[in-house]
Image (cartoon, rainbow, N blue to C red):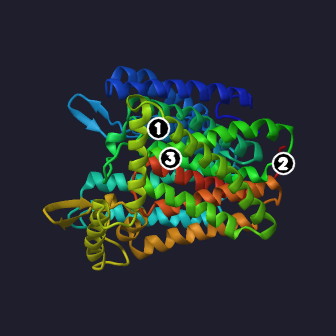
Amino acid sequence: MDKPFFVLTDSREREGVAFVFLLILLSIDSAANVTVGFSMPIFLSTVVLADGLAFLYPRAGLAAAISVTILFERFFTLVPMSIGEATYKLYPLDLILVATFASSVLLWIRDGGRRLRLRFTDLLLLTFFIIVTGIFIGGALGLGRDIGLATAFSTWKNYVFYGMTYFAVVAFVRTKEDLMTVGRMFLGTVAIGVSFLFIGLVRGGGLWTEYTPLSTPGTRFLAFPHAFSYSLAFLTVLLYFPFRAEGKTWQSEKYRYFVLVVLLFAGILGSLMRHLWIGIAVTLFTAVASAPVRIGRPLGRYFLAVAFPVVTIAILSVALFASLPENVVGDPVGDASAIVRERVLSIGSGTDESLAWREAVWKSALSRFSEHPFRGIGFGASVPVELGEYRQYVEVRNMHNSWLALLIQTGIFGTVAFAAFLVSLVRGSFQSGSGSAFIRGSRTVLTGLLLFQGIVFFSQPYLETNLLGIFFWVTLGLLRSLSDMRDTVS
């Protein structure tokens, strides 16, 4: 069992207590950011203290950072520090990660490198980091044109700084027990986050949905970032539990997980995020279609067994509420069902302005990319977009397609390095490790989550937004840990 840095005992209880304190401190600061905005006294008394605690207990710091990101999203990850009239884009998430990374490096040195032995896969990622860093430095020195330095640095952070989360996860998730703890922490936090769905239903609109307005008429009952974490949890439960052994523990747990799946499904539907719906459907279909016959058939039956009652409950609930007096619940439910229907029918429709906007931005960016296809156009660049009366310069990183943004900004060299890393990582996860039900189930979940994120990255700036991209780096890190894992802890 790993000893927390500078702590003489190797007690898991100490890490658990540290995690709770970190969660409380960071939640207080985030709640203050929601209500009154940035407050230096609150920041100093919570985030700075949490920063020191994260340095002493880096694994607890990383876990707390992920949990608070799930719950408070941008109010933890995107609130800048203000000193007088000056504003610095140094976020609470950044400080916790700096402490975690620094402690991780010291632990690695203390252990003589045993904690993390670099593989060829890791070297590919480091190569990508070097390319990205070179692009940023080149732009900062004036080798690029029309470069916004602050935007360029932010892009570098999203690709490299937050990407270092991958190595922190690999260093701290080393056993089956570690991986199970991560899963419980994640699902437990999302279960707490289900409260945001009820808040949205009560107030007639989800909290913080104004930051991601819809391109079609309608009201979201759940914010996009919360819906994204709901989707990850939804897939985690569905993809893993067919591998659970039928025992008393599973028999007592499955009803709770069924209720969780129903609530997550309702939240994802209420978010009106079409690309999440598509990503989930493609991921589940691929999981069944690509599994061996002895697994694929039971997996398909399992999905149907879950999907049928979930959809049935949803339909009956709508029918029940719609039958009540109109001024009570009937009208809102009828309006909600009409909105969902319109969002479904608008997929691929030429009437959706967001699709036309994306096409115009992508076309303009690709035209610029054609000038330097191998090294890309660099970071911090904007491209002109003309769409009817719309005339605007749009940041390339905000083009609502993370994969295309990666290609256009880092060029063929950077994209090939990152693609080689992903291929090597996935291949290694299937070639190494135990063949136990736990390892196979975990591999199915992680590759499914990776596929899901790979699909939805085509529709939004995930890698360019820390509160979304960090889950991608955690997924990659867990997949890398799984390739080294030995099923020794029951």
Q: Is residue 429 left or right of residue 388?
A: right
Using the numbered discs, state the Cα–Cα distance from disc 3 to disc 2 in whole angstroms.
Answer: 28 Å
* Residue 358, picture quadrant: bottom left
The answer to whether mark 3 and mark 2 are in CB contact below 8 A is no
Tell us which disc is closer to us: 3 or 1.
1
Q: Could you say where residue 99 lies in the image, as x and y percent from the top left?
A: 51, 37
Quarter holding the N terminus is top right
Sequence-wise, the earlier of marks 3 and 2 is: 2
Q: Say which of 200 and 424 sits in front.
A: 200
Q: Is residue 203 left or right of residue 27?
A: left
* Residue 436, picture quadrant: bottom right
Q: Residues within 10 Å of mark 3 (few under 14, many from 20)?
A: many
Residue named by callout 2: 245
Q: Could you say where residue 212 lies in the image, as x and y percent from the top left?
A: 34, 46
Residue named by callout 1: 322
Q: Is residue 174 left or right of residue 348?
A: right
What kind of residue is marked 3? Ile
Sequence-wise, the earlier of marks 2 and 1 is: 2
Quarter holding the C terminus is top right
Q: Could you say where residue 412 lies in the image, as x and y percent from the top left?
A: 42, 76
Residue farthest to the left, as pictured? 389
Residue named by callout 3: 268
What kind of residue is marked 1? Ala
